[in-house]
Image (cartoon, rainbow, N blue to C red):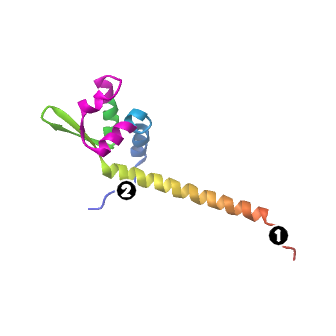
Amino acid sequence: MVAQLELSDAEIDRVFHALATSTRRDILRRTIEQEQSLSTLAADYDMSFAAVQKHVAVLESANLIVKRAEGRERLVRANPEMIARARALLAHYEAMWRSRIARLDDLMAAEATPAKEA
C-alpha cells in the first residue's frame, strides 16, 4: 500500500486552521507523547470540558488526531501519518524558499562583482 503524501487544498486548510491555536497545538503535543483520555486532557485547561471537546473536534477534522471509545472513556492519540504528511508539506515549502533565497543571493553577488572590461 502506498501512502498518499500530497495534501489537498482542503486538507491543508484544515491542518493550518487546527494548528492556529496554542491550545490545539498543546493537545497535539500531549497526544503525540501518549494516548490520553478526553477528560484527562480537559482537566489541564482553564476552560470547560465542552470547549476542549471542540478543540479536539477541530484536530480530529484535520485528521491530526484519532479518537476512540474504550468503555465510557474517549481516548485521543495523535495520527502520525497525517503529521508526517504535514511535515512533508512544510519541508517542501522550506526547500522552495531556500532555493529562492539562494537565487537572490546569487543575483546580489553577481551585481556586486564588477564586470571585467574587455
Query: Which residue is drawn at the image coordinates 73% and 60% (left, top)?
Result: 108
Looking at the picture, how far across and down is residue 19, in whole percent? 42, 39
Q: In this figure, which residue is indicated by the disc labeled 2? A: 5
Q: Quadrant of residue 96?
A: bottom right
Q: In this figure, which residue is indicated by the disc labeled 1? A: 115
Task: Label 2: state its secondary structure.
Answer: loop
Q: Residues within 10 Å of mark 2 (few under 14, many from 20)?
A: some
In the drawing, does residue 117 fall left or right of residue 28?
A: right
Magenta stretch encompasses residue 34? yes
Looking at the picture, how far across and down is residue 42, in whole percent? 29, 29
Q: Quadrant of residue 113?
A: bottom right
Q: In the rendered structure, which amino acid carries the disc numbered 2?
A: Leu
Q: In the rendered structure, which amino acid carries the disc numbered 1?
A: Ala
In the drawing, does residue 89 fall left or right of residue 104?
A: left
Q: Which residues are magenta?
A: 25-52
Quadrant in which the C terminus is drawn: bottom right
